Amino acid sequence: MLHIIGMIFKIIGLILAGILGLLVLLILVVLFLPIRYEITASFPGRPADARAKVKFSWLCHLISGRLSYEKGEVRWRLRAFWKKYGVESSEKEAVEGKKNAHKKQIEKKPQKRIEDKSKAEDKTRSEEEQKENRKKTEDAAKEEKTRHTADPKALERKNRHDAASKSEASDKDESPKRERKSFFIRLKEKINTFFGKLKYTFRQICDKIGVLKKKKEAFSEYLEDEAHRSAFARMCKELVWVRRFLKPKKLRMDIRFGLGDPYRTGQALAALSMIYPFVGEYIVVEPDFEEKVLEGELYVKGGMHLFHMAMLFIKLVIDRNVRTLFKDTRKLLGI
Protein backbone atom coordinates (compact mmCIF):
# COMPACT_ATOMS: atom_id res chain seq x y z
CA MET A 1 0.00 0.00 0.00
CA LEU A 2 2.77 2.40 0.94
CA HIS A 3 4.63 1.44 -2.20
CA ILE A 4 1.62 2.45 -4.34
CA ILE A 5 1.22 5.79 -2.52
CA GLY A 6 4.95 6.51 -2.99
CA MET A 7 4.67 5.80 -6.73
CA ILE A 8 1.66 8.17 -7.01
CA PHE A 9 3.56 10.95 -5.24
CA LYS A 10 6.59 10.29 -7.42
CA ILE A 11 4.51 10.61 -10.61
CA ILE A 12 2.88 13.82 -9.32
CA GLY A 13 6.33 15.23 -8.47
CA LEU A 14 7.65 14.41 -11.95
CA ILE A 15 4.64 16.08 -13.58
CA LEU A 16 5.07 19.22 -11.44
CA ALA A 17 8.81 19.30 -12.17
CA GLY A 18 8.11 19.02 -15.89
CA ILE A 19 5.57 21.87 -15.74
CA LEU A 20 8.00 24.00 -13.74
CA GLY A 21 10.79 23.26 -16.22
CA LEU A 22 8.57 24.27 -19.14
CA LEU A 23 7.69 27.53 -17.39
CA VAL A 24 11.36 28.30 -16.74
CA LEU A 25 12.21 27.48 -20.36
CA LEU A 26 9.41 29.73 -21.60
CA ILE A 27 10.60 32.61 -19.38
CA LEU A 28 14.18 32.20 -20.61
CA VAL A 29 13.03 32.13 -24.25
CA VAL A 30 10.96 35.31 -23.76
CA LEU A 31 13.79 37.13 -21.98
CA PHE A 32 16.74 36.10 -24.14
CA LEU A 33 15.30 35.86 -27.66
CA PRO A 34 15.80 39.31 -29.22
CA ILE A 35 13.17 41.55 -30.73
CA ARG A 36 14.63 42.31 -34.15
CA TYR A 37 13.68 45.48 -35.98
CA GLU A 38 14.52 47.24 -39.23
CA ILE A 39 13.60 50.80 -40.22
CA THR A 40 14.06 52.24 -43.71
CA ALA A 41 12.96 55.68 -44.91
CA SER A 42 13.61 57.88 -47.91
CA PHE A 43 12.79 61.56 -48.35
CA PRO A 44 12.87 62.75 -51.99
CA GLY A 45 12.31 66.46 -51.30
CA ARG A 46 8.88 67.15 -49.84
CA PRO A 47 7.37 65.77 -46.61
CA ALA A 48 4.29 64.61 -48.55
CA ASP A 49 6.47 62.36 -50.78
CA ALA A 50 8.23 60.65 -47.87
CA ARG A 51 8.29 56.86 -47.69
CA ALA A 52 8.99 54.74 -44.61
CA LYS A 53 8.83 51.09 -43.61
CA VAL A 54 9.19 49.42 -40.21
CA LYS A 55 9.59 45.67 -39.67
CA PHE A 56 9.90 43.70 -36.44
CA SER A 57 9.89 40.05 -35.42
CA TRP A 58 10.04 38.09 -32.17
CA LEU A 59 10.08 34.45 -31.08
CA CYS A 60 11.49 33.18 -34.39
CA HIS A 61 8.92 35.14 -36.44
CA LEU A 62 5.97 33.71 -34.51
CA ILE A 63 5.13 37.32 -33.73
CA SER A 64 5.97 39.76 -36.51
CA GLY A 65 4.66 42.94 -38.04
CA ARG A 66 5.13 45.51 -40.74
CA LEU A 67 4.19 49.18 -40.95
CA SER A 68 4.58 51.24 -44.12
CA TYR A 69 3.85 54.83 -45.13
CA GLU A 70 3.73 55.89 -48.78
CA LYS A 71 1.87 58.69 -50.61
CA GLY A 72 0.01 59.72 -47.49
CA GLU A 73 -1.33 56.20 -46.84
CA VAL A 74 -0.51 54.02 -43.85
CA ARG A 75 -0.63 50.23 -44.15
CA TRP A 76 0.10 47.75 -41.41
CA ARG A 77 0.16 43.99 -40.93
CA LEU A 78 0.51 41.98 -37.73
CA ARG A 79 0.96 38.25 -37.29
CA ALA A 80 0.54 36.57 -33.91
CA PHE A 81 1.22 32.83 -34.23
CA TRP A 82 -1.39 31.62 -36.77
CA LYS A 83 -3.61 34.73 -36.86
CA LYS A 84 -3.09 37.68 -39.17
CA TYR A 85 -4.38 41.23 -38.80
CA GLY A 86 -4.02 44.46 -40.72
CA VAL A 87 -4.54 46.15 -44.06
CA GLU A 88 -3.73 44.18 -47.22
CA SER A 89 -1.95 45.46 -50.31
CA SER A 90 -3.31 48.32 -52.40
CA GLU A 91 -3.95 46.09 -55.46
CA LYS A 92 -6.42 43.90 -53.61
CA GLU A 93 -8.09 46.97 -52.17
CA ALA A 94 -8.45 48.49 -55.65
CA VAL A 95 -9.98 45.28 -57.09
CA GLU A 96 -12.42 44.97 -54.21
CA GLY A 97 -13.31 48.65 -54.52
CA LYS A 98 -14.12 48.24 -58.23
CA LYS A 99 -16.30 45.19 -57.54
CA ASN A 100 -18.20 47.00 -54.78
CA ALA A 101 -18.72 50.06 -57.00
CA HIS A 102 -20.08 47.88 -59.82
CA LYS A 103 -22.48 46.14 -57.44
CA LYS A 104 -23.69 49.47 -56.07
CA GLN A 105 -24.36 50.79 -59.58
CA ILE A 106 -26.41 47.67 -60.43
CA GLU A 107 -28.38 47.99 -57.19
CA LYS A 108 -29.02 51.71 -57.61
CA LYS A 109 -30.80 51.43 -61.02
CA PRO A 110 -34.02 49.67 -59.84
CA GLN A 111 -34.00 51.74 -56.68
CA LYS A 112 -34.02 54.97 -58.70
CA ARG A 113 -37.07 53.80 -60.71
CA ILE A 114 -38.95 52.93 -57.54
CA GLU A 115 -38.03 56.28 -55.99
CA ASP A 116 -39.27 58.19 -59.07
CA LYS A 117 -42.62 56.37 -58.96
CA SER A 118 -43.02 57.03 -55.24
CA LYS A 119 -42.19 60.74 -55.72
CA ALA A 120 -44.86 61.11 -58.45
CA GLU A 121 -47.47 59.40 -56.26
CA ASP A 122 -46.59 61.64 -53.32
CA LYS A 123 -46.99 64.75 -55.48
CA THR A 124 -50.49 63.73 -56.67
CA ARG A 125 -51.56 62.91 -53.12
CA SER A 126 -50.30 66.23 -51.77
CA GLU A 127 -52.15 68.17 -54.49
CA GLU A 128 -55.42 66.35 -53.73
CA GLU A 129 -55.02 67.00 -49.99
CA GLN A 130 -54.42 70.71 -50.59
CA LYS A 131 -57.60 70.94 -52.71
CA GLU A 132 -59.67 69.23 -50.01
CA ASN A 133 -58.31 71.56 -47.30
CA ARG A 134 -59.16 74.61 -49.38
CA LYS A 135 -62.74 73.40 -49.88
CA LYS A 136 -63.14 72.76 -46.14
CA THR A 137 -61.91 76.28 -45.20
CA GLU A 138 -64.21 77.90 -47.76
CA ASP A 139 -67.22 75.94 -46.49
CA ALA A 140 -66.44 76.87 -42.87
CA ALA A 141 -66.17 80.58 -43.76
CA LYS A 142 -69.53 80.46 -45.60
CA GLU A 143 -71.22 78.80 -42.59
CA GLU A 144 -69.89 81.48 -40.20
CA LYS A 145 -71.16 84.27 -42.46
CA THR A 146 -74.63 82.73 -42.63
CA ARG A 147 -74.75 82.33 -38.81
CA HIS A 148 -73.80 85.97 -38.16
CA THR A 149 -76.35 87.33 -40.66
CA ALA A 150 -79.10 85.14 -39.21
CA ASP A 151 -78.40 85.95 -35.50
CA PRO A 152 -77.74 89.69 -34.72
CA LYS A 153 -77.09 88.93 -31.02
CA ALA A 154 -74.10 86.77 -31.98
CA LEU A 155 -72.69 89.71 -33.96
CA GLU A 156 -72.93 91.98 -30.88
CA ARG A 157 -71.23 89.39 -28.68
CA LYS A 158 -68.40 89.03 -31.18
CA ASN A 159 -67.88 92.81 -31.38
CA ARG A 160 -67.77 93.05 -27.56
CA HIS A 161 -65.26 90.21 -27.35
CA ASP A 162 -62.98 91.85 -29.96
CA ALA A 163 -63.10 95.22 -28.14
CA ALA A 164 -62.22 93.57 -24.80
CA SER A 165 -59.26 91.70 -26.34
CA LYS A 166 -57.97 94.93 -27.92
CA SER A 167 -58.18 96.80 -24.58
CA GLU A 168 -56.28 94.00 -22.80
CA ALA A 169 -53.56 94.05 -25.47
CA SER A 170 -53.19 97.84 -25.15
CA ASP A 171 -52.90 97.54 -21.34
CA LYS A 172 -50.19 94.90 -21.73
CA ASP A 173 -48.28 97.14 -24.16
CA GLU A 174 -48.48 100.13 -21.81
CA SER A 175 -47.48 98.22 -18.64
CA PRO A 176 -43.78 97.73 -19.57
CA LYS A 177 -43.57 101.36 -20.60
CA ARG A 178 -44.73 102.46 -17.16
CA GLU A 179 -42.31 100.03 -15.41
CA ARG A 180 -39.22 101.27 -17.26
CA LYS A 181 -36.35 102.31 -15.00
CA SER A 182 -34.66 105.65 -15.18
CA PHE A 183 -31.27 106.15 -16.84
CA PHE A 184 -29.38 106.75 -13.57
CA ILE A 185 -30.73 103.60 -11.90
CA ARG A 186 -29.67 101.49 -14.90
CA LEU A 187 -26.24 103.12 -14.95
CA LYS A 188 -25.82 102.42 -11.23
CA GLU A 189 -26.71 98.73 -11.70
CA LYS A 190 -24.23 98.37 -14.58
CA ILE A 191 -21.44 99.97 -12.50
CA ASN A 192 -22.19 97.63 -9.57
CA THR A 193 -22.11 94.54 -11.81
CA PHE A 194 -18.84 95.65 -13.42
CA PHE A 195 -17.10 96.14 -10.06
CA GLY A 196 -18.51 92.84 -8.80
CA LYS A 197 -17.00 90.98 -11.78
CA LEU A 198 -13.70 92.82 -11.31
CA LYS A 199 -13.60 91.85 -7.64
CA TYR A 200 -14.34 88.20 -8.50
CA THR A 201 -11.56 88.02 -11.11
CA PHE A 202 -9.09 89.66 -8.72
CA ARG A 203 -9.88 87.04 -6.07
CA GLN A 204 -9.37 84.27 -8.61
CA ILE A 205 -5.97 85.69 -9.62
CA CYS A 206 -4.91 85.95 -5.96
CA ASP A 207 -5.96 82.34 -5.31
CA LYS A 208 -4.00 81.13 -8.36
CA ILE A 209 -0.91 83.06 -7.25
CA GLY A 210 -1.14 81.44 -3.82
CA VAL A 211 -1.43 77.97 -5.35
CA LEU A 212 1.57 78.64 -7.61
CA LYS A 213 3.64 79.79 -4.64
CA LYS A 214 2.82 76.63 -2.75
CA LYS A 215 3.66 74.49 -5.78
CA LYS A 216 6.92 76.38 -6.29
CA GLU A 217 7.96 75.76 -2.69
CA ALA A 218 7.00 72.09 -2.94
CA PHE A 219 8.86 71.71 -6.25
CA SER A 220 12.02 73.36 -4.85
CA GLU A 221 11.91 71.03 -1.84
CA TYR A 222 11.37 68.12 -4.24
CA LEU A 223 14.52 68.99 -6.21
CA GLU A 224 16.69 69.77 -3.19
CA ASP A 225 15.97 66.49 -1.39
CA GLU A 226 19.10 64.33 -1.11
CA ALA A 227 17.18 61.09 -1.66
CA HIS A 228 15.73 62.45 -4.90
CA ARG A 229 19.14 63.56 -6.12
CA SER A 230 20.67 60.16 -5.45
CA ALA A 231 17.72 58.51 -7.21
CA PHE A 232 18.21 60.72 -10.29
CA ALA A 233 21.92 59.85 -10.32
CA ARG A 234 21.15 56.13 -10.05
CA MET A 235 18.63 56.30 -12.90
CA CYS A 236 21.11 58.10 -15.18
CA LYS A 237 23.76 55.51 -14.37
CA GLU A 238 21.44 52.61 -15.19
CA LEU A 239 20.27 54.24 -18.42
CA VAL A 240 23.89 54.56 -19.55
CA TRP A 241 24.31 50.84 -18.79
CA VAL A 242 21.21 49.90 -20.85
CA ARG A 243 22.19 52.20 -23.73
CA ARG A 244 25.01 49.85 -24.73
CA PHE A 245 22.55 47.00 -25.33
CA LEU A 246 19.87 49.13 -27.02
CA LYS A 247 22.31 50.58 -29.53
CA PRO A 248 21.44 49.38 -33.08
CA LYS A 249 23.87 47.22 -35.01
CA LYS A 250 23.53 49.25 -38.20
CA LEU A 251 22.68 52.92 -38.43
CA ARG A 252 22.95 55.27 -41.37
CA MET A 253 21.31 58.67 -41.50
CA ASP A 254 21.95 61.39 -44.07
CA ILE A 255 19.28 64.10 -43.99
CA ARG A 256 18.91 67.66 -45.20
CA PHE A 257 15.87 69.32 -43.67
CA GLY A 258 14.24 72.72 -43.34
CA LEU A 259 10.88 73.77 -41.87
CA GLY A 260 10.59 77.11 -43.66
CA ASP A 261 11.05 79.03 -40.41
CA PRO A 262 14.53 79.55 -38.91
CA TYR A 263 13.17 79.41 -35.35
CA ARG A 264 11.38 76.09 -35.80
CA THR A 265 14.32 74.64 -37.73
CA GLY A 266 16.63 75.60 -34.87
CA GLN A 267 14.30 73.89 -32.37
CA ALA A 268 14.30 70.68 -34.41
CA LEU A 269 18.09 70.80 -34.70
CA ALA A 270 18.36 71.22 -30.91
CA ALA A 271 16.16 68.15 -30.40
CA LEU A 272 18.36 66.10 -32.75
CA SER A 273 21.48 67.26 -30.95
CA MET A 274 20.30 65.41 -27.82
CA ILE A 275 20.90 62.03 -29.49
CA TYR A 276 24.08 63.15 -31.27
CA PRO A 277 26.47 62.12 -28.41
CA PHE A 278 25.23 58.54 -28.66
CA VAL A 279 25.12 58.02 -32.45
CA GLY A 280 26.94 61.06 -33.79
CA GLU A 281 29.43 59.08 -35.84
CA TYR A 282 26.68 57.47 -37.94
CA ILE A 283 24.47 60.45 -38.78
CA VAL A 284 24.87 63.48 -41.02
CA VAL A 285 22.34 66.30 -40.58
CA GLU A 286 22.32 69.42 -42.75
CA PRO A 287 19.80 72.12 -41.73
CA ASP A 288 18.31 74.57 -44.22
CA PHE A 289 17.08 77.75 -42.52
CA GLU A 290 15.51 79.28 -45.63
CA GLU A 291 13.50 76.63 -47.53
CA LYS A 292 11.01 73.97 -46.50
CA VAL A 293 12.70 70.77 -47.60
CA LEU A 294 13.23 67.18 -46.48
CA GLU A 295 15.81 65.09 -48.35
CA GLY A 296 17.89 62.08 -47.46
CA GLU A 297 17.78 58.46 -46.30
CA LEU A 298 17.54 56.60 -43.02
CA TYR A 299 18.41 52.98 -42.27
CA VAL A 300 18.34 51.37 -38.80
CA LYS A 301 18.71 47.69 -37.99
CA GLY A 302 19.20 46.01 -34.64
CA GLY A 303 17.69 44.02 -31.83
CA MET A 304 16.89 44.32 -28.14
CA HIS A 305 16.52 41.74 -25.37
CA LEU A 306 13.81 41.97 -22.73
CA PHE A 307 16.35 40.63 -20.23
CA HIS A 308 18.12 43.98 -20.05
CA MET A 309 14.87 45.87 -19.54
CA ALA A 310 13.85 43.43 -16.81
CA MET A 311 17.22 43.88 -15.09
CA LEU A 312 16.84 47.66 -15.27
CA PHE A 313 13.37 47.45 -13.72
CA ILE A 314 14.56 45.17 -10.90
CA LYS A 315 17.55 47.40 -10.08
CA LEU A 316 15.38 50.49 -9.89
CA VAL A 317 12.68 48.81 -7.79
CA ILE A 318 15.23 47.48 -5.28
CA ASP A 319 16.67 50.97 -4.72
CA ARG A 320 14.87 52.67 -1.81
CA ASN A 321 15.59 56.19 -3.05
CA VAL A 322 14.01 55.47 -6.43
CA ARG A 323 10.86 54.18 -4.72
CA THR A 324 10.58 57.33 -2.62
CA LEU A 325 11.15 59.42 -5.75
CA PHE A 326 8.20 57.79 -7.51
CA LYS A 327 5.96 58.18 -4.46
CA ASP A 328 6.83 61.88 -4.02
CA THR A 329 6.37 62.49 -7.75
CA ARG A 330 2.85 61.04 -7.61
CA LYS A 331 2.02 63.21 -4.62
CA LEU A 332 3.40 66.33 -6.31
CA LEU A 333 1.42 65.70 -9.50
CA GLY A 334 -1.68 64.60 -7.62
CA ILE A 335 -1.94 61.24 -9.35
Image (cartoon, helix red, strand yellow):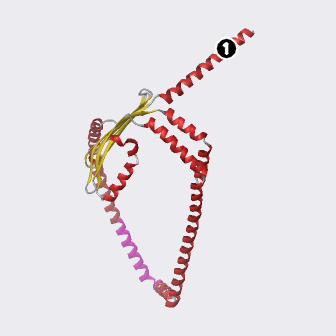
Question: Is 108 inside the magenta-drawn segment?
Answer: no
Position above or below: 175 against 23: below
Is disc 1 placed on a helix, strand or loop?
helix
- Camera-side residue: 29 or 160? 29
Position above or below: 328 against 87: below
> Residue 149's quadrant in the figure?
bottom left
- At 52% from the left and 26% from the top, the residue drawn is 28
> Residue 290's quadrant in the figure?
bottom left
- Camera-side residue: 308 or 176? 308
Q: Which residue corresponds to mark 1?
A: 10
- At 61% from the left and 49% from the top, the residue drawn is 227
The spot of residue 196 in percent (x, y) is 55, 79
Position above or below: 67 against 116: above
- Camera-side residue: 268 or 286? 286
Q: Which residues are magenta?
A: 132-155
Q: Residue furthest right?
A: 1
**What amino acid type should be assigned to the residue bearing mark 1?**
Lys
